[in-house]
Image: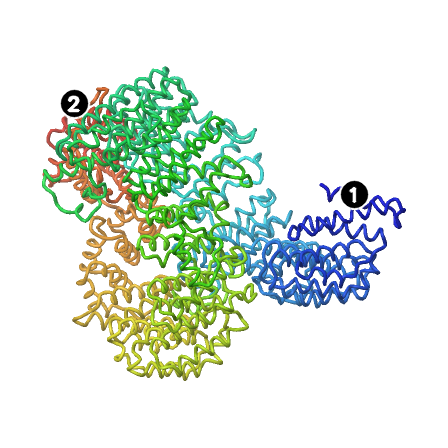
Amino acid sequence: MALDALRSLSLLFPSPPSPSHINIIEEALAVAEKTLASNTTNKDVLSKAAIVIATFKRTLSIVSPPTTIIEKYSTTPMVAIALLRGFAATYHTDVVESYLSVLLSFYKTYSGFDVDVSTRFYALQGIELLLSRSTADVRPPFLEAAKDVLNTVVMVSWENVGKNINTVLGGLFETIVKILVASGDTLGRTTALTLKQPDHSKGKYKALEILLPHTGPHLLLSTDPNLISVLINTCTGFSDNCNIAADLMIKIMLHLKSKDDAATDWVTKCWATPVAKNLLSPSPRTRIRTAAFILAPLLKASGKQIGEAAAAFLCALNTAHESEDLPPTRDIFQFTPSHIYLWAILETIKIAKSHSKLACTSEKLNSTIAEFLPGETFTNALSHNFDDIRLAALTALTISPSKSIPISPSSLTLLYENLPFSFKSSSPNYLSTLCDLLSSILGRLPKEKQHGFLSFIVNTLITKNLYPSTVFDKETCALHIFNKFLTPPNKSGEFNTSVAVLPLLCSPKAFAAIFSRLDSEWDRARDLASVVMKKIIQLKPSPLPSKLVCPTTFSRALFLASSPRSRESDSGANLLFLLYISSTTPQTFVSELTSILVSRVDAMSEALMNINSAFDGQQLPLAHGLFLALKMIILASNQSADQLKKIFDSCISAINISLAVVAESKDPTDDDLAKGYAHADFESSHQLANANNVTLNVNGGCLGANTSFGGLEMDEEETKRRNGVQRIVVGSWLLAKEACGCLAVSSVAGNELVEAAGGLLIKTLTTLKHQGAAFAAAAALNKIALHCFKSPSLQRLPSTWMEGLLKEITQKTTVHQSTLRRSSGYAFGFLSMMKAECSCFPPTSPLPITTSTIQSLLNWSSPSASQYKTHANRLSLDLENITPIDDDLYDWKCRVHSMNILRLLLLDSTLSLQLGPYVGNAIVIALLGFGDGSWAVSNSATMVFAAAMLKVVDSDKNSTASERSLLSTSAAPAPSMSTADSGVGSGKGGKGKSSAAITPNQLFLTYPVLRPFLLAELKSSVGKGFGSSANMTIYSIMLLLSRLQPAQLDDEGVCQDFIPLALECLCSKEHKLRLMASRALPVIVDSASSEKCLAYVQQILLALPSIDIKHGALMGMTALLGSSLFSRERRMNDDENTIVAVCDLLSNPNNAGLASEGFEALRAMMASDNVRVRSAKKFLGFKFAQFTPAARATKAAARTLVSVGIRTRKVEIIEVALESSHDSKVAGVKCLKKVLSNTDELRGEDERVFWEKVGVVLKGVLKREVNNDDAYQPTVRRVSRCLVMLENDFNLRVGLGVADMEWLWKVSNMEHREVDNVIELVAIAGGVIGERFQEQLEHSGDTRTTSWRCRLSVSEALGRADGFTTQFLDLLQDEDVDVRKSASRGVGYDVVAEKSVVLCCEESGLSTREILHVMERKVRSVCEHLLEYFEGELEGLRGVIGGIDNLNLGGTRRIFEEEKAFMFSESMVGVQALAKMVQRKGGKKEEGGGEEKVVWEDDDLTKLLLKVLSLAKIDPVSFALAVSGSAIFGKFHCLSLYAILKGNIVGVGNEQELREVIKTVIRVEGIHEEIANV
């Protein structure tokens, strides 16, 4: 405010001022100078103060020479820059020009990379301000200065800069361009300089955008003819410059278009061909980004000529697709070129139609679409196998630029026919787009057709998606659409689907289907079903569906809520909540439910008191589901204080009951935190905890469920014992989990309840032995803390609780070890309250609790005073940031707790801002902890160091970037086999750094304490032989350095002192130190010292005799040569002598221990495409026998040979690696397989020929391996897979034929996992006919015994055979999506599997006998499963239905049930399709004969079927409760269909009884009408 006032004041005085004004000016000048001196880093204050000073001095006619300012403020460059800026902005141009060279020289000094970012930014702004003084009237000195700045500052600095620097450089470049244009410069040289900037430089595109209005597009394109391709590759690659490159491309197009009226000309000339090739790329990323960043903006910018422009793109797509340049390969999503072409066509049409209605009326576009996308192709695309194509086709059919344009009748017909096949996906993006399309379609339909179309969607989803035993994709899709339909529109005028869809969803059939999903096997489906049901009820339909108000529904809800299985108890809680919001007397409902809860908690307490053995645990009632239901009710509506008090008391009792089982028993009278909730019955809970009962003190991790004992066969007694123990422990921790959540929401009834709840939750956290319950308690404590911070009368509580927690972990006399690993309970307590404080106050406001807690934890994580003194003397460093603990107060347990808590705080993203300034101190404390004599302290210090390193360096420890891999340094849009990384650099310095990593200079500027400390630690430890703790410290520091970005990106010499220490570590006797030092070298070495460092490493490799030193030198050389410090040409031209020397070194048998690293070094040095042939021949002379004893060396040699063979395209080099030991063959083939897996395409005929030769070699290796008695299965598996990939994915011919059948079938005698590859190889070889092939297919395609990989191979093999087999029906309904897609392609339809099943059934010509035989296989397995299920479940249900105490006791099911097999398999689709076929065929007469007779011989299956079906008739209510909404009913549904068909067509005994059973099933569950009518 004062500077603003002085600024206004400075403008009021005339020049020269009157004598009366001089004193005022001098006083104001003194104030401004004082302000300047006290703010040396604040740019805003400096700028304002400098302007005020310069203005006042100009008024007084005082000129302070810039040289004087520079000398006076040499130690504070920011102040000097500010004053010089004020000078340049205030004084006359003549005065500024006289000092131009001095000003410019000073600014340039502080505009380079070796200056901190703030000073550099300020200096660049000063240059811009200085040059802007001459933009209107260009003076020669300013013109020369602008050219000099362009060459020495802008073009040098603009490659790798931050956002702020990039912005100021853009403004500076624009100022220079204005000066050049005003001087008459044509900008030709400036354009050339700009275009020479690297493609990854953001400044290049910003500069071209500035130049474009002055130069026009023709100068840019003539200077660099490849500019359009560069822009397209930038938009579609992994660059961050895609947006700015796309903007530049559109601006170039608009400039061209303004000079050319024919839109098709400029599209064809400049963009059509390159865009078409990118749209057809095998890389999904390239295709998607091309459509989004290039095609869409181009078509949008074409305006009225959009139809012609789109037609030009379609023609270019067709031309590119028919060319021979595109490889016939599959991408990672199994897209073939035909699929990609279809998607590109649809995407182009979709984008064109979305931007202009003129596109729809363009004759050129319509004729082009008709030519390249016939009607049948488009119809198949609407039900295509791939989601992307199906969605693109739907969008292309329905999208419109205006909501007022109605949908055509033909489009509506296509929607009715094909839309049902689109309702199967769980992808959020797919579902969101599909819902938007449906809403758009409904909005564009006439009112008289809206209801019909909406009814069609709802009925289709109910019938096709929510039938019993449906699959996850269908179930989720239907519920997601219903949820979207029930959501009111955001904008007025949109079609309100919630009003129209409500009556449809409240129909008995629809409501029952959605209601049954509350018990779904899928968490997401249950949540969606609950949301949909809630919306239906809240919209208050009248009357409510009878299913919801049925008396047995409440019993069912209680029964499920009492289950020990979380899935069922959650379903019961959801159902109880829905009953509450639909109740006409909600308060009565809550009162009754609370009463049930109180009695259930009491019953649970009494049962635990009376448990004498594990078997008694089976009769333990459970209450956690009721707590969850009440929590949902409290959150949804306000409850009375008395009601909340009752629930609160129940929560207190329940938590204490659960703590008796899953917590450390502590006497509450000794616990200060127990004070304040005396109304809880502590005596009884204390008695319960200390009763003479071994069952209560159980180990929750040894339940026999998920351990190695879980899979052992058990007798009935052992099963009951385990079930009893599991029910006690699981029920107790679930009770703690849900009671804590309910406690948090019920405690708001009074302040005394809040205080009691917080204290109990902290006690729970510090004593629990179960991590899941601790998470729930922490979440509850966080909610209570939030409530406290928002309530003035309760704000003292979090501070009190935090002090209590700190007291528990820091008092030497009372601290004890944590009941959870790594002090998790204490840490959760700290996190809960600190996160609550951060959420309640702005980030910039002071957070006293959080700040003081962090500082306390850092202090208590520090060493003791005596240890501190030892460290300070050893390092010769003043550790001023460390506050040691007095020796009398120090305890290792206190330090371990503090470190463990500090680790979790560092890992929490919510506290990033608050913990940021302390991370450097945390690293120092952790490194000091490595040398502690206590293993516990050292271990916790390691965890703190790892958390801190991830916080400041990189959050993704597995991040990679292909730009710096040893074999691939080019930025090609899609990797090819000749450039793909075949395993190089993994852990050898070639591993790329994530873009999230920071440079050493940024690290040390942010945390100044680190650089001197790290250097002191290294100097103190390296070479001193301090033992394991010193080595651990060195390793950790090198690890930290290796994770940074290379120092060359911001070279300021900060790492120069680390280089000698890292080189010394290369010579260490410890392998791990050598390894980590080699990884750190490419980071700390800059461009200036790289050659010297490499020469030193090569020198010690050849000169020193120690094996350890040579080993370290090889690793260092590999890392340096594999980094971006050295180009490929540098490796090729200068390292051949070293290559030969290393080869000679490896040829010496005494150096066998160096072989592994030696070969890795050779691979790095020979990473060029033009490796000298002489060096390659040196490889061929190697004898692998000498490396056989060292398997690791053999593997490294094989990997190296394969990599060099790929680079040189010499098959004979690869043969050497594949003709030796098992280890070398496995390693070599793994390397080949990795290259094939990471390759999108083969480029050029030469590369295809080379890989065909490799395939022939692999075939020979496989044949020799199979014919050997000691065939090595890993080799067989990988070689056969490589051959399959070459044939299927890259369409290469490896020479397999019918003559190879005999030896190929030998593989099937090996382990089952090798058979899948052989099946495909046999099919490739043409052996698809014969009994053996059919038998193998039938065995390998069995979903009960084989893996998805094997079934996929069967599907691929069947696809090569002619004709249709019934096995396709099983594969089309397989649980694996890839198998289904492959089978759909195999039968020739390439549409969704469901449609393929229908088409197969309709067109296969199968007889009724064959159809029933297919169904019989499914029915037998279903019957066997159902009998096993019902034996235990129905017995548990009988006798408890209808009562209010549905305790869910007596069942024999396991709590931890095994995952149901084939949960993604959709067998019902085939059963329904086959049933419809039998219905049509059953009564028909064949030509020349009477009615078809089917003789049924399987009487055992008939008896089994009747036995299962009769269960429903014996106890229909129990049956309904057992199977309602579950997959079990889906299986019963399958049997019902089968039984009806068999009774109608074949005829069985007791036909009337069978029909009565079927009627019972239909009545109980309400099977859909169309199925019942079958």
Q: Residue extending furthest front?
A: 888
In this view, 247 is above or below 1270: above
Residue shown at 23% from the left, 35% from the top: 661
Q: Quadrant of the C terminus?
A: top left
Residue 54 visible in the displayed image: yes
Earlier in the chain: of badge 1 and badge 2, it is: 1
**Residue 1288 sits in quarter:** bottom left
For the residue marked with disc 2, what is the amino acid? Answer: Gly
Q: Nearer the viewer, residue 1175 or 694?
A: 694
For the residue marked with disc 1, what is the amino acid? Answer: Ser
Residue shown at 44% from the left, 55% from the top: 923
Residue 995, position in %: x, y?
49, 57
According to the image, label 1 marks what residue?
8
According to the image, label 2 marks what residue?
1439
Q: Nearer the viewer, residue 1545 or 1181?
A: 1181
Q: Nearer the viewer, residue 786 or 1362?
A: 786
- Kindly identify which numbered label has been placed on residue 1316: none
Mark 2: few/some/many CA within 10 Å (<14, 14-19, 20+) = few
Q: Nearer the viewer, residue 707 or 1258?
A: 707
**Residue 253 sits in quarter:** bottom right
Residue shown at 36% from the left, 62% from the top: 1032
Q: Quadrant of the N terminus?
A: top right
Q: Would residue 1252 appear left or right of 289 to someone viewing this image? A: left
Residue 1468, position in %: x, y?
27, 39
- Kind of element beneath mark 2: loop
- Kind of element beneath mark 1: helix
Residue 197, position in %: x, y?
61, 65
